[in-house]
Amino acid sequence: MFKKIGDFFKGLFDKAIAACKALIDAALPTVSQIIIGQLKDFALKAVKEVQGLDMDNDAKRKAAFDKISGYAKDNAIEAKDSLVNFVIELALQAVKNGNI
């Protein structure tokens, strides 16, 4: 009898975990888009600032990364490194293509 009760709760728990995972998976793209929107204007400014500096491209990327991640922290925006790098790439393409 206790095994049946344990199996019931295990199945219920597994279903709850699967539902939570599906909800999180569905929400992550939206959250990423919100964060990108919050960072894009500052990222454009940061990329334009470092573009004119006398540094190699890796140093410019690091400087832009530091500026943007610092801005995110100062404004309580939780942005992972991969998302900051993505925003840098978007801003860099916009600057190079004159889309700003």
Image (cartoon, rainbow, N blue to C red):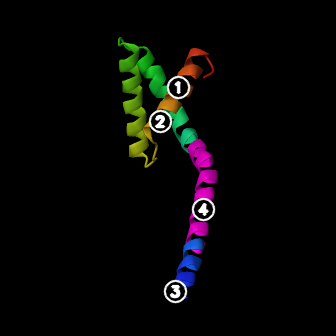
Q: Which circle, 2 or 4, is nearer the viewer?
A: 4
Query: Which amino acid does the dot numbered 4 rest on?
Result: Ala
Quadrant placement of the N terminus = bottom right
**Residue 84, image x and y in percent?**
47, 35
Can residue 39 be found in the magenta stretch? no
Residue for point 41% across, 39% down = 71
Structural crowding at the residue carrying mark 3, measured as other residues with C-alpha within 10 Å and reported as few (<14), some (14–19) or many (≥20): few
| Residue 16 numbered tag | none
Q: Which circle, 2 or 3, is nearer the viewer?
A: 3
Disc 1 + disc 2, Cβ < 8 Å: no
Residue corresponding to mark 4: 18
Residue corresponding to mark 3: 2
Q: Which circle, 4 or 1, is nearer the viewer?
A: 4
Residue corresponding to mark 1: 89
Q: Earlier in the sequence, mark 2 or mark 3?
A: 3
Can residue 21 be found in the magenta stretch? yes
Residue corresponding to mark 2: 82
Gap in Å between the C-alphas at discs 2 and 3?
47 Å
Report helix, strand or loop for mark 2.
helix
The magenta-colored residue range is: 12-34
Disc 4 + disc 3, Cβ < 8 Å: no
26 sits to left or right of 10: right
